[in-house]
Each structure stands twice: as structure tokens, then as C-alpha cells.
Image: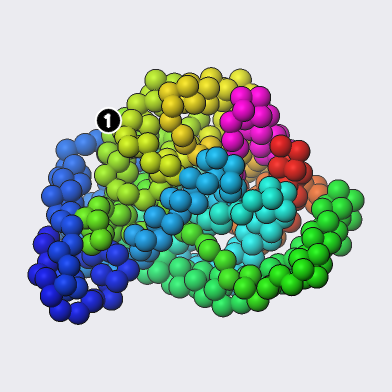
Amino acid sequence: MRTPAGGTRSGVYAYGVNTRTVTADVGLEPADGSEALAALTAAASELEASQQPAWPDTAALAEVIETLSSYPPLVFAGECDILTDRMAKAAVGEAFVLQGGDCAETFASATADNIRDRIKTILQMAAVLTYGASVPVVKIGRMAGQYAKPRSSTVETREGVTLPAFRGDMVNDFAFHETARVPDPQRLVRAYHASSATLNLVRAFTTGGFADLRHVHDWNRGFVANSANQRYEKIAKDIDKAMKFMAACGADFDAMRTVEFYAAHEALLLDYERPLTRIDSRSGRLYDTSGHFVWVGERTRQLDGAHVDFVSRISNPIGVKLGPKADIDEVLRLIDKVDPNRTPGRLTFITRMGAGTIRDALPAIVDKVTASGATVTWICDPMHGNTFESPSGYKTRDFEDIVEEVRGFFEVHQSLGTVPGGIHVELTGNDVTECLGGAEKIIDSDLEKRYESLCDPRLNHQQSLELAFLVAEMLGQA
Ligand SMILES: O=C[C@H](O)[C@H](O)COP(=O)(O)O
Ligand SMILES: C=C(OP(=O)(O)O)C(=O)O
């Protein structure tokens, strides 16, 4: 798509992302990405894409894809590039990444209070981690797009009735009846609007004064006072002292009222991600404008599959999940495919091995990747390798296992001289009872009290902060 030279700058062009329909008019001949975009679209029909819904109404789907293609980008190419730089810093220990948010966002829970509380939790965690790591924390919400889920089974059976599995609000409804579970492409459009509203609020909260470090520190003091844990108290007191010292030195706290905050989700539903992929008019490169950072999951990272092909064609920073059975040759080929130019910050491996497995499974992978000369960012997801069914029948995780996997992650990297670049957690700002343990000592019989996740169990507000204090200790010792 070449655009005519001369004229005035269009708003869309100014942010560095061209839509398919908007022609920028800026006196420059922007790079042409139309061939790359056509190839990306063509790959849609050529490659096997796992974990996609069987949309019953393909004409309705085609209309929705057209609609999404005409909508404005949710994020901008320039923002994605900044995040790539931040991820590059995390790869070499000059930053630490905190990715967190719901397992599965829902349309109903995209409320101002829920979004505020999740951001608040992430900001509180980030303040503690910044102190522990003594480097900037890159804050990334698992939000504004995390509406689709890969499933172990295509169906769910309850009391002898078998229906299609719930695949996330972007696909079907959680209610267990036949019509609710039929994949409805209109939900892709709803997901776009819910993501747009969420991002709007995220941008307001993170730039409008809510994120002021002084408030965040006060919230943490409140948490520590209630927790009565001396280890956390010590860290909070140390942060207090550091802030007083900074104030005495004349630090401008007003300049710390805003924070950078990025949005991430699994690039699972290609019928959503492809139409939101746009040409960056500065460079002609493609960006998936549905989120700043997108990742490919453990179930969809086939080398010759559509997901890996898709992310290899876009220029966002990319994550790939690696489970305990990840094959090292496959991992090296993934690097060649997703990061052929070895761009710092481009590729993040999010390892999710399990607390009992990480010390055995991770070293060989990190070692071989390092030996290959590639620099990737290593992030620990201590959630997905530690899920089990409790005696009362809830899918849960134990807080101790989660902490233990992060501890193993740090130990492995320390022993290899490589960099533990961040953590990726499923969390909520609410007081749910989904994961066992933590200072509140949630036990199996508590799970039913407030189990609200529609898929996997999340850390609640309190458990999330505890994790941050414990990881800050690990960072302090690293
Ligand atoms: O979040 C990850 C997966 O979508 C989830 O663990 C799959 O859950 P299932 O095994 O219940 O399908
Ligand atoms: C599905 C997820 O994880 P994984 O691909 O690691 O199982 C997830 O993070 O939502």
C-alpha cells in the first residue's frame, strides 16, 4: 500500500501505524508493507492452526474479520518498539519484567473497579520488585486481550452431558448449555471493544496520578501492617528509608506520578490477531496492534504451525511458552524462526516447568540457547506447571509450589551465569480463593468461598504481594 506524497500528517500515521484503509499524507514516501500483509493473510489458509474454534457461521466470521480490519489499532508500533528495548534490558539484567493479570478476562469483569484493583496490585508488586532488583521493573498487564483460552479437551462433560469446552469470552459463553457454548464470531468484536475500554482506563490510571510512587508505597505499608510478617516489614522499612533519602536529595516525586504500562495476551485466536495486524507506516513492517506483547502458548508453538508463522511475521516483542518437555532442537529452531536477526528484546521464553521439574528441565535449555549465541529474555511463569485438582474438585495451585518454582528459576540462572529476567503470573486484585496457601492459609474447603476464575486459579491480591516480597528477597540475593 503506497501512499501519495505531499499534504498533511494524519493522526494514524503520526503514531506510526497505518491501517489498511487510511492513506497517510505526510510528504514522505512511507515504506510499503502490503506484500508482507498479503503473505500473512495468505498463510491463514495454508497452515494448520491448533486450538481454533469451529465457527459454525463462516459468512458471519468473514464479516467480523472485515469489521476488525477497519477498526483503529489498540496499540501503536512505536510503543511496541519501546517495549522491545525494555525487554532487551531485562535480558541483560538492566531491568526486570513483571507480567500479570487474569487467566481469562471476561466481558462482565471488565469493570472500572476490577481494572483499577489489578493495576494497583501490579503497581504494588512492581514497587517492591524495583527495590529488590535495583533496576526498573517493566510492567505488563495480562490484560486488554486475554479473552481466549487453549483447552486440554475440545469438550466438557457434566453429569452425563457433553458440550463444547468454554474457550474464553472471545469465543463462547461459560454457561453450560448448548446454545451458550456455540462459538459466535460477534464475540471477537466484543473482545475488541472490551480491550479498547480496558486500555483506555489503563492509560488513564497509569498516567493520571493513580500510579504515584508515594501512594503505591502507602498501599504497601498498609499490606505489611496487616500481614505482621517481619521479613516483609523489613523490606518495607528499607523502602521507606530509601524514599526519605531520595526526598532529602531533592528527588522529584511529582515526576514519578506516571508509569509505563504495557498490555499483553496470548496470540491464540488468529481470526482476531490477523485483522488487527497493520503496516507501520514508518518502516513498512507489520505489527499486531491488539497488544504490545503477544505470546504463543505451550499448546500452539508447533514450528510449522500457524501461530509461530504469525508471530514470525510481526514486529512486536514476542513470548513463547516452554514447558518441561520442550525439545532443545525445537527451541533453537524457534529462535531461528521468530528472531532470525537476533534483535535484542524480540524474543522472550516464558518457562513454565513445574516446581518439581524446573531444576532438572531448565538448565539444559538455557545452556544450549546461551551456547547458540542467541540472547533471549528468560521469564518464569510459576503457575502453569503447578496446577492440580484439589480433593474438593477445584483446579488449584499451591502458593508454596509457585514460590518454589521461582526459587528454582533463580537458582538455575545463577548457576549458569545467565539472567532471570522476570516473572509472569496469573493474578487478580480481588480477594478470591483460588490458589491454596499464602499467609491467609487458604485450604481446600475455602476454595468454594470465592472461586471466580472461569479457567485457571489466580493469586489473590494478598498472595500476589507476598510473592512480590519473596521475589524481591531472591532478587536482593542474586
Ligand atoms: O491457561 C492455560 C490453559 O488454557 C488451561 O490450563 C487449560 O485448562 P484445561 O486443562 O482445563 O483445558
Ligand atoms: C495457556 C497458558 O499457558 P500455557 O500455554 O503455558 O499452558 C496461559 O498462560 O494462559
Residue 226 part of the magenta-drawn span: no
Apparent side of residue 216 relative to residue 148 in the rendered image (left or right): right
- Residue 222, position as x, y percentages in the image: 81, 66
Which class describes the residues within 10 Å of circle 1: few (<14), some (14-19), or many (20+)? few
Q: What residue type is labelled 1?
A: Asp
The residue singled out by tag 1 in the image is 304
Apparent side of residue 192 relative to residue 367 in the rendered image (left or right): left
Residue 402 part of the magenta-drawn span: yes
Q: Which residue is drawn at 45% across and 73% down?
A: 200
Q: Residue at x 64, y 42 (%)?
A: 396
Apparent side of residue 415 relative to residue 183 in the rendered image (left or right): right
Q: Residue at x 45, y 54 (%)?
A: 83
User: Which quadrant of the figure contains the C terminus?
Assistant: top right
Specify the color scheme.
rainbow
What's drawn in magenta, residue-wise? 400-423
- Residue 53, position as x, y percentages in the image: 31, 47
